[in-house]
């Protein structure tokens, strides 16, 4: 402070505060405190503040059997209806905050809720699907909603729709239609999603029970629990034909009618040993891999010197695909599509 006072005679107050790294508000507050005789820049207590005894009465009230699980607003309203007034509910919050009790007060609340890590494995198509909804920007600051369901074993898009709204009824219709069109029997499939409103809706939950489809959800704010949907949306939005903005709903649907077949039938997926999703989903990988191996054999026979590691072998796609694989091999693996128990 003394250094700032010395500089004020040479430069403006704001410059002096900036040079000394002192906020101007702090300087003026301390200067005001010095002129009024208060020490340390602390504000004098308001004459309207509750006394120590009154504050203790409020704490006793909030700690009591009746109100220990109630929010200050609820306490305030209940007492007011009974003709009792200890102060505004904002005052209750200030008293709690002064005593370090402004967080969760309900009995039985000890920590944040813990969610089990979803562990799902697919060893063939139609064992585990994952689905999500992403926003598509449209003209005039509008947004559209793209719903996509993916088979994680093959990365095949088994169902999709574009709509102007995010609604549980649309999710219900898409899932119902997709499960029936793909011929999935009850008890064969687990459907995984994040914790969006449509994903956790009662409408979708009842449908899955009716279809005999097990459901699984990501942990809150853990995007890695739904990696296949996230990766698909990134691939979609980085595709050269993906527009910056769609003109309207029809434009978005026309794009998806062209893009989804390309993704399924022509896109060579790095996670599938450069096979297409359709090849793996429909079980044609052995024929394709044999054809590739024959081509490599011919190339090796013609120029073996180009293959310093010996005869080349065509890589194969994984035989099982996980959402959150077990951390150690010793951990028992769940059956296909079933979440591990912790």
Image (cartoon, helix red, strand yellow):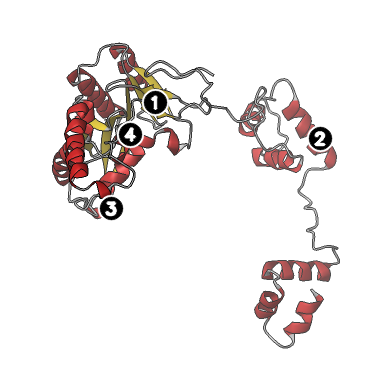
Residues at marks 3 and 1, CA–CA distance in whole angstroms: 28 Å
Q: Residue 226 appears at what percent x and percent y? A: 39, 34
Label 2: how many residues lie within 10 Å, few (<14), some (14-19) or many (20+)? few
Label 1: how many residues lie within 10 Å, few (<14), some (14-19) or many (20+)? some
Q: Nearer the viewer, residue 146 or 232?
A: 232
| Callout 1 secondary element | loop
Q: Tell me which label, 3 or 2, sits earlier in the chain.
A: 2
Q: Does residue 136 show up? A: no
Q: Is residue 19 left or right of residue 138?
A: right
| Callout 4 secondary element | strand
Q: Tell me which label, 4 or 3, sits earlier in the chain.
A: 4
Which quarter of the picture shows residue 299? Answer: top left
Which quarter of the picture shows residue 301? Answer: top left
Q: Tell me which label, 1 or 2, sits earlier in the chain.
A: 2
Q: Tell me which label, 3 or 1, sits earlier in the chain.
A: 3
- Image point (77%, 47%), residue name: 49
Residues at marks 2 and 4, CA–CA distance in whole angstroms: 51 Å
| Residue found at the very far bottom of the displayed protein | 10
Q: Quadrant of the N terminus?
A: bottom right
Q: Tell me which label, 2 or 4, sits earlier in the chain.
A: 2
Q: Is residue 59 above or below residue 67?
A: below
Q: Badge 4 is on which residue?
A: 132
Closest to the camera, between mark 2 and mark 4, is 4
Q: Badge 1 is on which residue?
A: 200
Tag of residue 141: 3
């Amino acid at each position: 402070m003394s250094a700032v006072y010395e500089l004020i005679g040479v430069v403006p107050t704001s410059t002096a505060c900036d040079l000394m790294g002192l906020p101007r508000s702090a300087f003026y507050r301390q200067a005001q405190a010095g002129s009024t005789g208060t020490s340390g820049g602390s504000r004098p207590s308001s004459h309207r503040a509750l006394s120590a005894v009154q504050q203790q009465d409020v704490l006793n009230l909030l700690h009591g059997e009746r109100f220990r699980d109630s929010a200050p607003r609820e306490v305030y309203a209940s007492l007011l209806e009974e003709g009792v007034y200890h102060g505004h509910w904002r005052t209750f919050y200030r008293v709690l905050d002064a005593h370090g009790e402004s967080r969760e007060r309900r009995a039985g609340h000890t920590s944040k809720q813990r969610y089990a890590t979803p562990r799902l494995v697919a060893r063939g198509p139609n064992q585990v699907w994952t689905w999500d909804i992403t926003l598509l920007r449209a003209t005039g600051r509008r947004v559209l909603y793209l719903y996509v369901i993916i088979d994680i074993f093959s990365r095949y898009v088994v169902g999709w729709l574009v709509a102007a709204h995010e609604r549980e009824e649309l999710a219900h219709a898409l899932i119902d239609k997709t499960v029936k069109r793909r011929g999935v029997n009850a008890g064969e499939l687990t459907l995984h999603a994040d914790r969006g409103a449509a994903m956790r809706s009662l409408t979708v939950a009842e449908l899955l029970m009716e279809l005999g489809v097990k459901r699984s959800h990501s942990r809150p704010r853990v995007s890695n629990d739904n990696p296949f949907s996230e990766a698909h949306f990134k691939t979609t939005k980085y595709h050269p034909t993906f527009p910056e903005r769609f003109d309207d709903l029809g434009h978005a649907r026309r794009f998806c009618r062209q893009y989804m077949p390309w993704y399924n039938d022509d896109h060579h997926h790095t996670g599938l040993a450069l096979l297409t999703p359709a090849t793996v989903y429909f079980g044609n990988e052995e024929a394709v891999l044999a054809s590739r191996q024959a081509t490599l054999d011919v190339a090796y026979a013609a120029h073996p010197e180009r293959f310093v590691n010996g005869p080349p072998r065509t890589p194969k796609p994984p035989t099982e695909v996980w959402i959150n694989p077990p951390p150690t091999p010793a951990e028992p693996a769940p059956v296909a599509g079933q979440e591990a128990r912790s």
